[in-house]
Image (cartoon, rainbow, N blue to C red):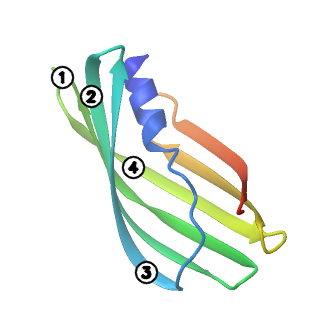
Amino acid sequence: MIKTFIALAATTAVATPAAFAGTYVNVEANSGFTGTDYEGSVTDIHIGYEGGNETYGFYVQGVPAIIAPEGGDGETRLSGKIGGDISATEKLGVYGEFSLLSQEDDNLYGTKIGAKYKF
């Protein structure tokens, strides 16, 4: 259960609008805690591509995720994300993301959808 939580946390980063079109590297570490007890971390080392224009943006990224549970053996798995955003108005944007993390039995999947309003 704890490993699943940590792995799922690694797949749910906030979607950001495309600032430029092109290839990028995104390194992100996500740690999990139960109360004050450290459970472990997942570090994504993704290579991605993003693009779009003033109205919409998209990105796709993936490859390794390093799973490091507290007191356990670490392992490397495949992970990835695809997402995008649309500017509904000058102040309102809508975004979404689909993510996955490979597992021995059942893969983990995550979805995200949200809205951002600028004042």
Q: CA distance from mark 4 to mark 2?
A: 18 Å
Residue at image location 43% in from the left, 81% down from the top: 23
The earlier-in-sequence mark between 2 and 1 is 2
Q: Which image quadrant: the C terminus? A: bottom right
Left or right? Give the position of 51 relative to 113: left
| Label 1 element class | loop
Q: Position of residue 48 (x, y in %)?
A: 45, 71
Mark 4 and mark 1 in contact? Answer it, CB < 8 Å: no
Q: CA distance from mark 4 to mark 3?
A: 19 Å
The earlier-in-sequence mark between 4 and 1 is 1
Q: Which image quadrant: the N terminus? A: top left
Mark 2 and mark 1 in contact? Answer it, CB < 8 Å: yes
**Residue type, numbered disc 1:** Gly
Mark 4 and mark 2 in contact? Answer it, CB < 8 Å: no
Q: CA distance from mark 2 to mark 3?
A: 29 Å
**Residue type, numbered disc 3:** Thr
Residue at image location 26% in from the left, 22% down from the top: 38
Residue at image location 50% in from the left, 49% down from the top: 13
The earlier-in-sequence mark between 2 and 3 is 3
